[in-house]
Image: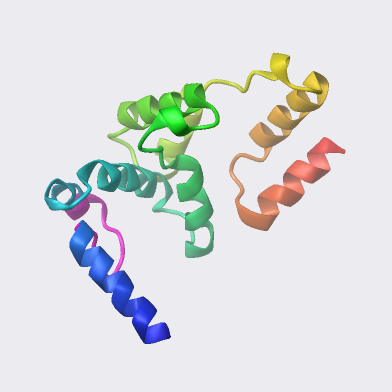
Amino acid sequence: MLRRRMLAMGVMALLSGWPVTGWSAEPLSSACRQSIAPQRCELMRQGQLSCSDLPLEHQRECRQLFTPQLNCSRSRDARSCQALQQAQQACDAQQGEARRICIRERLPAPDCSRAAAPERCRQRVEAEQACGGRYGADYRECVAKAMR
């Protein structure tokens, strides 16, 4: 089972143009031009550039936050999706923590006026901003403590 999964990952990496052994910032952009899905590959590269300096256990969650969607019309919050795409393009020259800071500065604050509990929404936004540099269980614990 494990061999099959690893073989499938290798085949997908070869088909998509992604390196089999991991991500690298520079060769990937040229590989994206040759991949089957160049737009998706480029979005994945942008997400990886934002998270490359983090320990491996936090990179997956970071990439989920900082990788823009391919089609914002399918997104739950199209405004935030488009803002993330624009922020990724604006911060393209940076990498790691500097890139994450640059992107966060350009993202709009959530609209709490339409929330069922606007005060609770504002409290959550403040908690998420205060805990912005953390990931995983540490982030969730930080937000929960700040919400109390």
At a point 24% along the width and 59% down the height, the residue shown is 18
The N terminus appears in which quarter of the rendering?
bottom left
Q: Which of 61 and 77 is in front in this view?
A: 77
For this view, does 131 lie left or right of residue 52? right
- Estimate the x, y position of residue 94 in percent, counting from the top left: 33, 37
At a point 60% along the width and 51% down the height, the residue shown is 135
The C terminus appears in which quarter of the rendering?
top right
Is 122 situated above or below 133?
above
Q: In which quarter of the image is residue 132?
A: top right
At a point 74% along the width and 31% down the height, the residue shown is 124
Determine the main secondary structure of the stretch shown in magenta: loop
Seen from this angle, which residue lies furthest top?
Answer: 113
Q: Which of 101 and 113 is in front in this view?
A: 113
- Estimate the x, y position of residue 93 in percent, counting from the top left: 27, 34
- Estimate the x, y position of residue 28 in percent, counting from the top left: 21, 52
- Residues shaded magenta: 17-28
Q: Quadrant of residue 23?
A: bottom left
For this view, does 87 lie left or right of residue 114? left
- Estimate the x, y position of residue 63 in percent, counting from the top left: 45, 49
